[in-house]
């Protein structure tokens, strides 16, 4: 790197272009800007694990008691061992999933003049487009652009959303919320609690939908789509296309999470690990980038952000505690946890560490 390289100015110029990573690709860059280049140890693409994350079949879980019991047992294993699992027969039609992916892709590949209208880092905006939420605090930028939509508890007006995904997003979100509620009910039962316990705690209250776009990368061995991190919310439901690249850390090894047609990926978030007192685990994960592509995904975070300022405190669930199992974390509001995690950025460290007793 040149001794005269001004990293701060380069990042500022990139941000002020409001064009994102897609803008770099459209401009024909064949060499990564230096602030995207990660240390080699971070981008090592090897998957050295032969494990596979569990697949949980949700067919008939609301009508058949034996099927529900089986699904609960499978979720318990997945949530305590991997922190990740895929769900099939989840009730969301393939055309809804395909239309949502298509809408997100069309937005990111649409006219730059349209995208610039949504470009902002103002968290008070319910609809935001930018590249790298932590651009100014992270050591390395990631090769992706994101359309962020705060969809619950107070969704944006229809006209606030981009034309490309306006028609599909409300239909998609309605079904994702129903699936999220079902999963939280089953996870409650896995903990030995009443099925509505996590719902009563309002773990399904908020929903942040992130439409990620990972353009083809000229030097994919030098950067990442997303660096190692865990998710801050209660659960995340991920819709991904067929390009692949998602990996989860399991037993100190990276494990591929290959796309499976019709399946959705679900992972435990930090706040669910906190309130279950480490019974469920929020696993680190990352996304490798490819020279081909692009890759599109839609991550649905069940979390309330700064837009909704609830003062409810979350700590380890009392029913899960005992003299032998004391609380491991102090109480925190969702807003404070999200804000701390947001300001910290993706740095490879869990925000949970700051809340341990």
Image (cartoon, helix red, strand yellow):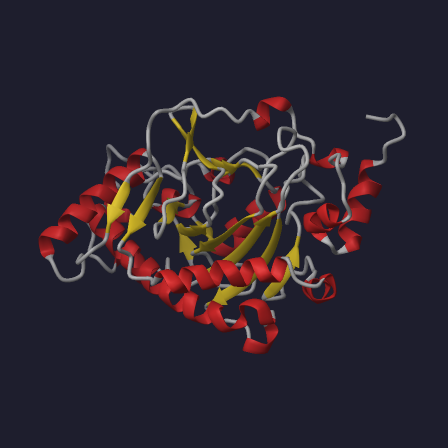
Viewer-proximal residue, 328 or 260? 260
Please indicate, yes or no, whether residue 154 appears anywhere in the rendered image. Answer: no
The percent coordinates of residue 183 (x first, y second) are 29, 54
The percent coordinates of residue 340 (x first, y second) are 57, 47
Name the image quarter holding residue 195: bottom left
Name the image quarter holding residue 274: top left
Query: Would residue 258 be found to the left or right of residue 70 on screen?
Result: right
The percent coordinates of residue 255 (x first, y second) are 41, 30
Q: Eyeballing the image, is 113 above or below 318?
A: below
Query: Would residue 72 be found to the left or right of residue 122 on screen?
Result: left
Q: Eyeballing the image, is 90 above or below 231?
A: below
Residue positioned 9% across, 51% down in the render:
66
Residue positioned 86% across, 32% down in the render:
5
Residue positioned 42% across, 56% down in the render:
302
The percent coordinates of residue 141 (x first, y second) are 67, 39
Q: Eyeballing the image, is 145 above or below 217?
A: below
Seen as rendered, the residue at the extreme right is 4
* Quarter of the rendering occupied by the C terminus: top left
Please indicate, yes or no, whether residue 294 appears anywhere in the rendered image. Answer: yes
């Amino acid at each position: 790197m040149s001794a005269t390289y001004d990293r701060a100015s380069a990042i500022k110029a990139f941000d002020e272009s409001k064009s994102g990573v897609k803008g770099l690709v459209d401009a024909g860059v064949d060499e990564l800007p230096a602030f995207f280049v990660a240390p080699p140890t971070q981008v090592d693409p090897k998957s050295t694990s032969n494990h596979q994350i569990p697949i949980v079949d949700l067919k008939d879980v609301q009508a058949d008691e034996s099927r529900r019991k089986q699904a609960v047992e499978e979720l318990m294993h997945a949530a305590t061992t991997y922190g990740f699992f895929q769900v099939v027969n989840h009730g969301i039609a393939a055309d809804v999933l395909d239309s949502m992916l298509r809408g997100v892709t069309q937005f990111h590949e649409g006219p730059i003049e349209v995208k610039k209208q949504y470009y902002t880092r103002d968290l008070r905006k319910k609809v935001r487009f930018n590249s790298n939420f932590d651009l100014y605090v992270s050591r390395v930028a990631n090769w992706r652009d994101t359309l962020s939509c705060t969809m619950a508890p107070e969704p944006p007006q229809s006209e606030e959303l981009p034309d490309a995904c306006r028609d599909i997003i409300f239909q998609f979100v309605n079904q994702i919320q129903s699936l999220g509620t079902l999963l939280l009910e089953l996870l409650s039962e896995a903990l030995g609690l009443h099925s509505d316990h996590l719902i009563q705690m309002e773990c399904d209250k908020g929903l942040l939908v992130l439409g990620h776009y990972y353009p083809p990368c000229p030097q994919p061995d030098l950067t990442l789509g997303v660096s190692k991190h865990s998710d801050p919310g209660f659960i995340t439901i991920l819709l991904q296309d067929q390009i692949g690249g998602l990996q989860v850390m399991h037993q100190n090894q990276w494990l591929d999470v290959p796309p499976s047609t019709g399946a959705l990926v679900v992972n435990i978030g930090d706040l669910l690990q906190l309130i279950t007192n480490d019974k469920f685990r929020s696993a680190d994960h990352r996304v490798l980038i490819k020279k081909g592509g692009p890759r599109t995904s839609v991550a649905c975070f069940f979390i309330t952000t700064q837009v909704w300022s609830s003062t409810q405190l979350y700590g380890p669930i009392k029913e899960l505690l005992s003299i032998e199992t004391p609380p491991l974390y102090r109480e925190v509001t969702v807003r404070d946890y999200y804000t701390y995690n947001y300001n910290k950025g993706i740095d490879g460290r869990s925000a949970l560490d700051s809340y341990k007793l």
